[in-house]
Image (cartoon, helix red, strand yellow):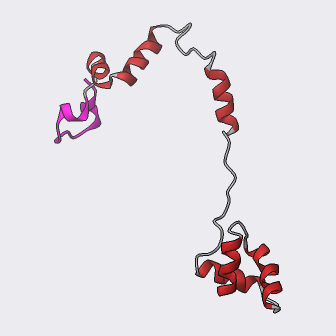
Amino acid sequence: MNCVREIIQEHPEYGYRRILPELEERTGQRVNHKRLRRLLSEHELALPRQMPKRGPSPVDKILEKASRSLNLVEGRKGDFLVCLQALVAPRQFLSCTGYRTASEIGPNSDSERDLIG
């Protein structure tokens, strides 16, 4: 294991595939690649796995292109703006439409009809 540590100190970028021939050359013995890989991982000497960086998904690319010219409010009438208000301020929206929230009705309500004002 000392020989393996020396190789790793000299060449920290080497993985088990490059360490194997170097180790065989230094020791003059054949080394099983599976055993070498297992020993490197047990002693935490193996290189960390390199994962390719993920790019944006195709849907994200389309939304990115569309966001520059996307206008959700243009050409819409009042219903859309009321729904938009419901997203921004749901409590005020419910009170102006006559609906009540569950906390306003109370914990002892027996039916779903109590939710309608």
> Residue 98: x percent and y percent?
27, 19
Above/below status of 19 relative to 48: below
Quadrant holding the C terminus? top left
Q: Residue at x 76, y 77 (%)?
A: 19
Span shown in magenta: 101-117
Q: Is residue 59 magenta?
A: no
User: Picture quarter containing residue 39?
Assistant: bottom right
- Residue 54 visible (yes or no): yes
- Seen in the image, is 29 located left or right of residue 7? right
Numbered disc total: 0
Q: Is residue 54 above or below residue 2?
A: above
Residue 55's x, y, as percent?
A: 68, 42
User: In which quadrant is the N terminus drawn?
Assistant: bottom right
Whole-percent x, y for residue 24 in the image: 81, 86
Observer able to see residue 1: no
Given residues 26 and 54, the one toward you in this image is 26
Q: Is residue 10 above or below residue 63?
A: below
Residue 112 location (% of width, % of height): 29, 36
Q: Is residue 37 left or right of residue 18?
A: left
Camera-nearest residue between 25 and 40: 25
Q: Nearer the viewer, residue 67 or 88?
A: 67
Residue at the spot x=67%, y=35% of the render? 59
- Residue drawn where x is 32% and y is 22% of the image: 89
> Is residue 116 part of the magenta span, yes or no?
yes
Asked if 74 appears above or below 70 in the picture, the reply is above
